[in-house]
Structures are given as structure tokens and as C-alpha cells.
Amino acid sequence: MNQTHTWKQKVKMMLHILLPIFITQVAMQFMVFFDTVMSGNFNKENLAGVAIGASLWTPVYTGVSGIFLGVTPIVAQALGARKKDRIASSVIQSGYLAVAFGFVLILAGAFAIEPILQAMSLEPDVAEVATHYLHYLGIGVVPVLIYTVLRASIDGLGQTRVTMFITLLSFPINVLLNYMLIFGKFGFPALGGAGSGLATSITYIIIMLIAIWFMKQNDGMRELGMLSMFEKINWLTWKEVLRIGTPIGLSIFFEVSIFAIVTLLMSNYDTITIASHQAAMNFASLLYMLPLSVAMSLTILVGFEVGAKRYEDAKQYARLGIGSAIGLSALCAVLLFLFSSDVAALYNPEPEVRALTQTFLFYAIFFQLSDAIAAPIQGTLRGYKDVNAVFIIAFISYWVIGLPTGYALAEFTDLDAYGYWIGLIVGLAFGAVGLFARLAVIERKAKQGTLKEA
């Protein structure tokens, strides 16, 4: 990355960082998309089973992996401050921490999965698919957390095209493995929706190995000393990663888990409702990749400028990112309104599932506007290493406002399942307002020279 002096240069630099991240995020989300679509085309019980399994796994995975996204601002600020000697050690120590977290997750899952599923009112076939899906995902826990560290490090250095190519290489492999393991092709057993869990784990292993190979072979990475030697555990580095990463992980967990909790609460409805909700939520998550990619770009760009103490440049990048996200998300909302029936048809051919999915998709339109504001501001604040406020706002907006509102509307009005979606929309809107107010405070402190260095 380089310093920019004009708006034109900033647009060019942002596109250089953003486009590979967007392609990467879409490709990764397409893996989940194909898991859901291909499982749904096996039958609706497998679609519902994958929905329940993913609802348990996704918040845990995103929350824990979110901790290691803290590596991105650490690396970006070190690069901006010309402290390159700190980068390699931060990466290797974060890798050790990722392995430790991975084994804890595997151990916790071994004891918790079956009791949790038994406590839910699931049809036996759905519960069986969810159980096997989660067990297969356990194989890839450690590899995906290690990859998250490597990816966050590469992105923090501004080399987002690298992670894009890694993901694009692995994407067709994941789809092929889904085809083989879900439907039992080329001599493999037909595992149904559970096979998508195994396919995902194998893909995690592949992308981890490719990232390690890149870091060992790239001249720039070797110059920084990336993965060149083993170190003793450095508790101070672990503390720094956890101090920055834990609020990031918790804020992501609170955001993602509320969607998972809503899906789990919907287990009280019939299989058609569960399947339709999951299909609509899956597509809404795909659209979310746009503002999320802008957010990840802003973490890198703002972190680089803050590390160099160029606060006005950081503010300009923030405005550029927020404006872009709002415009593009509004366009996506219009397209979703026009083509919701076609989107619904992708997930399941049964008329009842298709009709209900289309209705849920109309609610997803309102997600776009709040996400277009909230996500880029989150990314900007992380670039400043201002992570605690994001965590508090996420907790209040999703768990204190969003979930109770949705529960009340679903249980005590005629809205039923739609009430949960309205509650989510209310929570997202509150979060967007709170984050905007926090950004104003941080930028004012930066202008006044009273911003504390994290």
C-alpha cells in the first residue's frame, strides 16, 4: 500500500484493496450457498438439517475467527508506522493461539452437540442430518482458524489479491466435493446434507495449505520473515491479539448468533418454514458480502493511515467506503425486489417452500440499507483499533433490542415467523445509528489530537 493525496488516488487504492476482498467473500459465501442449495435439492429434510447445523456452527466459527481478524489492523498499523519487524512475530503467535482455540472448540463440540440437538423439537431425520453435518465440520476447525490468521495477515499487508486467488482455486473444489459427497457420485457414498460438512472441512484444509505455501514461497513474505521459524509462546503478543480481537469476535458473534438463534427458535415451526427461512437468510447473507467487503477494506486502509497518523486521509477513506456501500446495497435491494421469485426457485422446487422463501426475501431487502451503513463503520472503527464500542453497540442492538422485539412480535401478534425478521431489522437499524455516532466521536478526537493510541 502507498500514501494517496487525491480523491482519485484514493478511489483507485480502495478498488485495488476492495475488489479482491469482495470476490473472496462472495466465493466463500457461495460455498455456503451451494451447501444450502445442493442440500435442498436432495430433499427438504436435508435443507432443514443443514440449516440447524449451520445455525449452531456459524456463530461459534465467526465469533472465534473474528478474534483473529484483529490481526489485520495490527499488521496494517505496523506497516503504516514502518514497524515491519513486528509483523512476522504477530502472525506466528496468532497461529499458535488459533490452534489452541481450535482444539478447545473440538472438545466442546464433542460434548455439546448431541445434548443441544436433543433439546430441540426437531423431526428425527432433520436432527440426524444436523448431527452428522456438525461432526464432519469438526475436521476442519483447526485448519480454518489457522487460515483465518494467514488471510488476515496477508490482507493487512494490502495483498488482498492473494487471498482472492486462493479462494477462487478452492471454490470449484468445494462444489465438486459437494456434488460427490451429497449425491454419492464417482463411487462416493451419498451422505446428503451431512456431506456438505465434510466437503467444507476438506476445503478448509486445502486453503490453509495453499496459504502456507504462498507465505513460504513469496519473496516479500520471506523478506518479512513470515513463517521462517518457530518461536516460544509470547504471552504479551497473545494479550495484544486478544485485546484487539476479542471485542471484534464478540461483536461478530452477537451479530451472527442472533440470526442463528432466530433459526433455532423457528424449530418450533414446521420443516417448510425452517427451510424457507434458511433459504432467504442464506441469500441475504450473500448480499451482505458487499458491505462486509467494504468494511474489511476500510479496516486495512484506515489502519494504514492511522498507523501513519494521517487522520484526515483515514476520514476520507471512511466517507468513500460508506457512500459506496449505501449506493451499491440500494441497487441490490432493487434487484432483489424485482427477482425474488427467481431467487426463491433456486433453493427448492416445491411450491410451498418457494412461495414462503419469496416472502422472507422481501424482508431481507430492508437488511440492505442498515448493513450498508453499519458494516463500513465497523470496519473503519476497527482500523482505529476502537473495538470495545462496536462490541457494546452490537450487544445492545441485537440482544437487548432486536431479539426481544422479534420474539414479542412472533409470539404475541399474528406476524408469527415474520415477527423475528422485523425484530432483526429494528436491531440492525439501531446498530447503524449507534455506530455512526461513535465514528463521529473518534474522528473528532483524531482531529483534536486527543485520540489515544491502542
Image: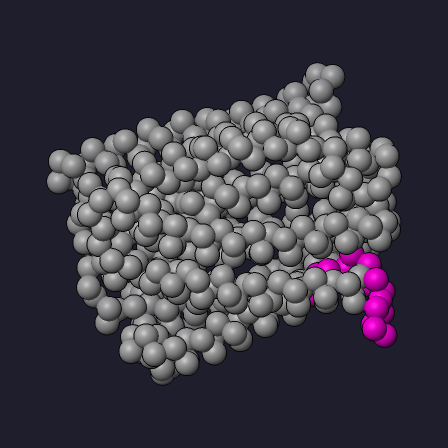
Relative horizontal placement of residue 321, taking residue 135 as reference (left or right): left
Q: Taking the image as drawn, is residue 103 in sight? A: no
Magenta segment includes 29: no
Depicted 36 relative to depicted 214: above or below: above
Q: Where residue 342 sits: x, y (%)?
A: 74, 37
Q: Position of residue 51 (x, y in %)?
A: 72, 47
View extreme (top): residue: 413
Instruction: Based on the picture, tell me whether residue 191 belongs to the magenta stretch.
Output: yes
Quadrant hosting residue 434 = top left
Of 218 and 353, which appears nearest the observer?
218
Q: Nearer the viewer, residue 276 or 30?
A: 30
For image coordinates 39% across by 50% down, the residue present is: 15
Q: Where does the image place residue 128, in percent across and percent down from the top left?
A: 82, 55
Image side of residue 417 versus residue 149, left or right: right
- Residue numbers of the magenta segment: 183-199
In the picture shown, does residue 63 fall above or below 101?
above
